[in-house]
Amino acid sequence: DVGQIWVAYNFLLAFLLSFRTGKAYSRWWEGGTLLQQARGEWFNAFSSLIAFSSQDIGKIAEVKALHRLLATLMSMLFAA
């Protein structure tokens, strides 16, 4: 009688533990996917800012300074 209760308890505990572990793993995977998606969006924004910056010869120093500033800010955004 006590043995059956112990077996049922262990089965229930194992089931709940495996269920919670699966849920935690799926949440972790979803977070990683969303992080990569956000990173891609920021990379596209950064690329567009670089691509559409001025090509005027007289503004080369200002454009390079802007590019460096954008790279620094983007690097800080990703804590790299």
Image (spheres, rainbow, N blue to C red):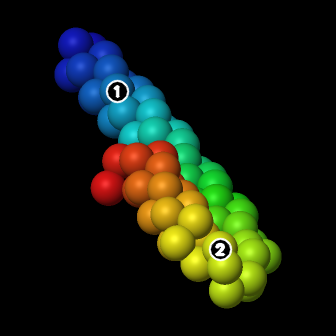
Look at the picture and state if 59 lies above or below 18. Answer: below
Look at the picture and state if 1 lies above or below 26. Answer: above
Question: How far is mark 2 from mark 1, CA to CA?
Answer: 68 Å
The residue beneath circle 1 is 13
- Which tag, 2 or 1, sits closer to the chain's start? 1
8 or 47, which is in the foreground?
47
Q: Nearer the viewer, mark 2 or mark 1?
A: 2
Residue 72 in sight from this viewpoint: yes
**Quadrant location of residue 11?**
top left
Q: What residue type is labelled 2?
A: Lys
7 or 31, which is in the foreground?
31
Q: Do the residues labelled 2 and 1 touch (CB within 8 Å)?
A: no
Residue 36 in sight from this viewpoint: no
Look at the picture and state if 26 lies above or below 14. Answer: below
Residue at x-position 48% and y-position 50%: 73
> Measured from the top left, where is residue 37 in percent x and y?
65, 61
Q: In which quarter of the image is the C terminus?
A: bottom left
- The kind of secondary structure element at disc 2 is helix
Mark 2: few, some, or many residues within 10 Å (few <14, many ≥20)? few
57 or 31, which is in the foreground?
57
The residue beneath circle 2 is 59
56 or 39, which is in the foreground?
56
- Left/right of residue 25 with respect to residue 41 in the rendered view: left
> Measured from the top left, where is residue 3 in percent x and y?
21, 22
- The kind of secondary structure element at disc 1 is helix
Look at the picture and state if 75 lies above or below 56. Answer: above
Q: What residue type is labelled 1?
A: Leu
